[in-house]
Image: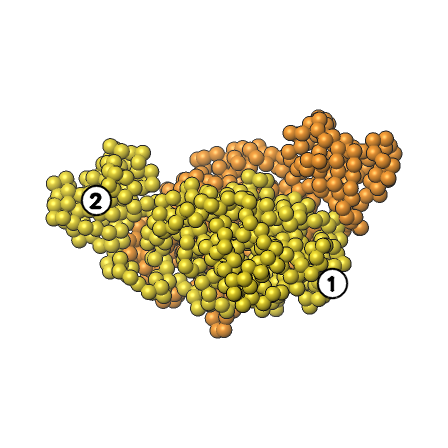
Chain colours: A orange, B yellow
Amino acid sequence: MTHVYIDRIGEFVGQTVTIKGWLHNRRSSGKIHFLVVRDGTGFLQVVMGKNDVPEETFKAADHLSQESSIIVTGTVREDQRAKGGYELTAHALEVVSTATDYPITPKEHGVDYLLDRRHLWIRAERQTAILKVRHEIINAVRDFFNHQGFILADTPIFTPAACEGTTTLFPVQYFEDETAFLTQSGQLYNEANAMALGRVYAFGPTFRAEKSKTRRHLTEFWMVEPEMAYADLNDVIALAEGLVSSVVARVLDKRATELKVLERDTSKLETVTTPFPRLHYDEAAKILLDKGVPFQVGGDLGGTDETVLSQQFDRPVCVTHYPAAIKAFYMKPDPNQPDRALCVDVLAPEGYGEIIGGGQRLDDYDLLLQRIKEHQLPPEAFEWYLDLRRYGSVPHGGFGMGIERCVTWICGLEHVRETIPYPRMLYRLYP
Amino acid sequence: MTHVYIDRIGEFVGQTVTIKGWLHNRRSSGKIHFLVVRDGTGFLQVVMGKNDVPEETFKAADHLSQESSIIVTGTVREDQRAKGGYELTAHALEVVSTATDYPITPKEHGVDYLLDRRHLWIRAERQTAILKVRHEIINAVRDFFNHQGFILADTPIFTPAACEGTTTLFPVQYFEDETAFLTQSGQLYNEANAMALGRVYAFGPTFRAEKSKTRRHLTEFWMVEPEMAYADLNDVIALAEGLVSSVVARVLDKRATELKVLERDTSKLETVTTPFPRLHYDEAAKILLDKGVPFQVGGDLGGTDETVLSQQFDRPVCVTHYPAAIKAFYMKPDPNQPDRALCVDVLAPEGYGEIIGGGQRLDDYDLLLQRIKEHQLPPEAFEWYLDLRRYGSVPHGGFGMGIERCVTWICGLEHVRETIPYPRMLYRLYP
């Protein structure tokens, strides 16, 4: 019998097919069992009439427990009332394995209980929907860069030095007496790659040993980081706008079913088209102060500040020209306003805050060396990075976009912890 | 003036365009400069006649050093003799930054010298060709799985327990008093994901603290790992064959230029079509013994054994049914031959050896628990993994494919160290 995945069931109307999956839930009306089966690609209602199957099959279905693995053969029927528009009229049922007392029931469970059972929790309809949106976002990001001719160049996870300070680095014992640090960003390597390959992107896990327990932080998270040679801040902003709008459009197009499961208000995503509004840091500060937010002008935007700002617009907003003093050493100062960096943060709307940070990089050897010293970083660790300014330096820039924050926003979630199969947090390393 | 990337130059014949890049090399015949410019997308010869540009421009080009960054404007001409088929007749030249004494010259350098300067070495024509083939392989892999409906589900880098023993794990201090280990394989998590999403793949960096200094080992390498619910060994082999043949076909199709730079004998890749030959472990052992290789029957295949075996075929070979005793605890024994595992290793031809390892997983709770104990692994660390057999266990399987070994083979390289932008090895953590 033809094995069919539920997401393709519509191609088999009137035919007899086999589906292989797990019992999601079940109700019975004496003479009919309604079994909702999931197979990873979707959910399907199976209708089993007492007179349509052997007696022992009907009895087996009577006691079938949640998450038991089953193989069902039956005829596909179109039914507008059914979820997904199709039903299966069962002829045969094989129970592969019975699940006794599956620990996640339709009742409410606390979040710690669920996170302890994350390997099972991901089977829930809502969780699979989030993970499919994540899949779509990641592939949309890759397609966006590939179609424009960017080359994927992986930056190392083991790094000898820190990109942005050392307090939030995870140290690893690297054989006998060396210490490696887990990367926080592939950016410095990306810059070298851009000088070799023109336009590149890195896409991998990054690590931050932050002792924050906020709804925006994971210790292990995925980041995509494009970098372009011969590019300025405007090019960087245009790239960020193009990326974010194309990712949102793709999810709206391909994952409508999942967004519906998540009860996402998609009207809030449909407005995410280019151009995005741009705010100079000073304008952003003024908005915050006008709103009565106790913002310290000259300082970085905090989570609350970002939330307030991003609530002002119906699409992401690009905040530029932060004070150079609070930004990383590799940021290029604005020639017209040297205390400001040619940088951009993109804040997602609806209060979701920063999803992208980047800008134009310092391309002058002397100034870069001076900034490294000012930041009390050891110049010898940055010898190779300085080489990029010794040999054929060009204006260049790029950004990093956090995947989990993107998923949180696009799915409309409260907390970043549901956006990755196995979240790693301050007190969470299991399963 | 229109900025054009060199790989698109053919679309602009007869037009005046600007290219932005770096001087790769230069020769002069008194009245004409021939400048080869690279921009990351390709290499282009620029012809600058003394009478076609202002005197100071011609003089500037006279002293231009390797890897200086330059912007050239000129007219695109078709020329069959030119590399790539096109030339640019220069009208104007802007020197962005002069590179003095670029340390990698056309002369021969030792490998350690080059690896110390990997951030510059990647600009070499051969290295960019390898990195573009890597890019193509990775995207071909992702497209293969995406088009078949697999869902990308990232498995964690920080893990609390070991997948295959602890001697080759990198420990990380995870906040105060916890130790995390860097993942060696996402497989156990993949199995949980497959029970949730049906067919999944993980694609990320993996880590092995092996003190080997062979041409096949990196401490940090990328692996793709598909896993399928409701699948047996035959499904796993079919998937592996499909993947490898489609990746090779894609590289042949899209990266002919790069394979030519690498002087790859592509006739050796054109034979990589399905089906692949299959060898039972016992047959493999017989071939080795017949060839006079001192192979210990019952043991694992070593690097030399793999090399000898893979030289026997014009395409990858699938070796199956290794002794269960030498394979991981989660391998399913063959019901017809219980001392053998339902496993498969795929060996690349031309002596390249193992690129894929996988098989069918143990789906029986009692037997899995017994195997965990036999391997002296702590059952409490595998509680969540055992849950997958408690709740809706199904036959399932998958494999892992090492990206760098694939790149080594497809590019025809001697050593795995050139297959990743920044290789990490026993004594190499810089740059």
Report x, y in % for residue A51. 86, 30
Residue situated furthest bottom in the rendering: A177
Residue situated furthest front in the rendering: B290
Q: Counting other residues with Cα less than 10 Å from the Cα at mark 2, is it few (<14), some (14-19), or many (20 or more)? A: many
Q: Is residue B301 above or below residue B128?
A: below
Q: Where is residue A41, by image quadrant?
A: top right
Q: Is residue A227 in view?
A: no
User: Which residue lies at the image location 88% right of the left edge and 34% below the top edge?
Assistant: A30
Circle 2 residue: B93
User: Which residue lies at the image location 65% right of the left edge and 54% below the top edge?
Assistant: B342
Query: In the image, B399: left or right of A6?
Result: left
Q: Is residue A254 above or below residue A424?
A: above
User: Which residue lies at the image location 76% right of the left edge and 46% below the top edge?
Assistant: A96
Amino acid residing under circle 2: Leu
Report x, y in % for residue A61. 82, 40
Q: Is residue A245 above or below residue A157?
A: above
Q: Counting other residues with Cα less than 10 Å from the Cα at mark 1, is it few (<14), some (14-19), or many (20 or more)? A: few
Query: In the image, B28: left or right of B344?
Result: left
Q: CA distance from mark 1 to mark 2?
A: 73 Å
Which numbered disc covers residue B34? none
| Residue A37 vs residue B269, the one in the foreground | B269
Amino acid residing under circle 1: Gln
Query: In the image, B14: left or right of B413?
Result: left
Which numbered disc covers residue B370? 1
Q: Secondary structure at mark 1?
A: helix
Q: Are marks 1 and 2 in contact (CB under 8 Å)?
A: no
Q: Secondary structure at mark 2?
A: strand
Q: Where is residue B429, by image quadrant?
A: bottom left
